[in-house]
Image (cartoon, rainbow, N blue to C red):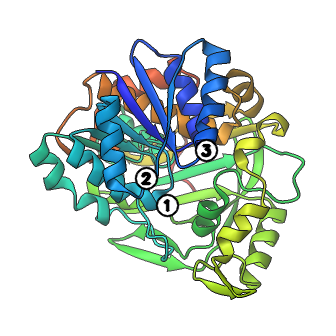
Amino acid sequence: MGKTLVVGAGGVSHAAVHKMAMNSDIFTDITLASRTKSKCDAIAAAVKERTGIEIKTAALDAYKVADTVALIKDTGAELLVNLALPYQDLVLMDACLEAGCHYLDTANYEPEDVAKFEYHWQWAYQDRFKEAGLTAILGSGFDPGVTSVFATWLKKHKLETIRQIDILDANGGSNDQEFATNFNPEINLREVLAEVRHWENGAWQTSPAMTTKVEYNFPAIGLKNMYKMYHEELESLTTHFPEIERARFWMTFGDAYIMHAKVLENVGMTRIDPVMHDGKEIIPIQFLKTLLPDPGDLGAETKGKACIGDIATGQAKDGSGEKTYYIYNICDHEECYAEVGSQAVSYTTGVPAMIGAAQVLKGNWVQPGVWNMEQLDPDNFMDMLNAHGLPWQVHELDGPVKF
């Protein structure tokens, strides 16, 4: 195996395709496709300059299943890596089933007209992928993705059970922009402004967006305000690790980001329903996206570090009672840009996409059906994180988190 079709040509794709080219013994043939072929060509040129590896490019409307099927067959791709918008997950899964191709993505499906991201739409494909003898890997980014693998590694090597888990995502990076999101603005704002959900005592607890704030001292970054949010790995982790009593997700934001996001929401610029403007129908958040900086263009001016990881508490495997571990990665924006021309947020999603794809191509994760990352053996994935730019560390804490 080794023939890979990558769909999507944003910042994450830029990082992922560079890392695939740097592992040409695994990724022997790479095709990059997007609606805008010129974006693919620009990434291909950058890859050629940095690595000497040539990748193929193609124009593709990912919403058209027949077109994707034709491209899979034309390229001979054995694996489709979906780095496009999450709205396209289901049609790309349909194409893989029709063409006989394995599938991997970095974010779960959400309908374009409803700000709701859940796994049930993709989990419904389980029997179809099993019957076809094909593998679908869901959420092979960092969060979701590495954060789920971190939890599985802890369960395999440190903890017999996980009673509670907190996922902490801190971006200590800064740039010269008044307001910029660190990944696709449309997806970012839909997530940030969504109703907060966390799992506790056997049920989902809800609260308004951006209302629960905690100051936390992050390794290599320092004190940052983090806000409780909903994120999709909470759904999959509590489903596959049913002993979890509480699961929460936290992300850091500066005061200026919160102020801008709230103002944009209050004036209607984050609406996802159509409105009439000057006799034409537009989606406000999509118009807003065209005005905001492209996160993929911010690598050269972004400085600082990101720190993402899990704090998990549970019964120790050695019978020594309850233990708490903090497992995390620290990633430097400038180092990422020097290596692949991406800032750390794109890098921390693109590298795990490459590593997850490598697990499929190497045969480690080839198991018919639809799988979340925490359901798969973590060890080779964790080894590859250390070897390919996302080294991790784990420390025992004095006890469960106080927040």
Name which of mark 1 and mark 2 comes first in the sequence.
2
Nearest to the observer: residue 361 or residue 164 = 361
Q: Nearer the viewer, residue 163 or 388?
A: 388
Q: Which residue is mark 2?
A: 62
Dot 1: what SS?
loop
Any part of residue 127 in sight: yes
Marks 3/1: CA–CA distance? 21 Å
Name the quadrant containing residue 186.
bottom right
Residue at 18% in and 48% down: 129
Tell me which label, 2 or 3, sits earlier in the chain: 3
Q: Which residue is mark 1?
A: 231
Crowdedness of circle 3 by 10 Å Cα count: few (<14), some, many (20+)?
Answer: many
Q: Residues within 10 Å of mark 1 (few under 14, many from 20)?
A: many
Kind of residue indicated by mark 3: Gly
Mark closer to the observer (1, 2): 2
| In the rendered image, the vertical position of residue 104 relative to residue 257, given as above or below | above
Residue 10, which numbered label?
3
Determine whether label 2 and label 3 are within 8 Å by CB.
no
Identify the residue at image location x=57%, y=73%: 194
Residue at far left of view: 131
The percent position of residue 60, horizontal first and vertical second, equals 46, 47
Q: Position of residue 344 (x, y in %)?
A: 68, 37
Instruction: In this rendered view, identify the residue nearer to me: 156 or 123.
Output: 123
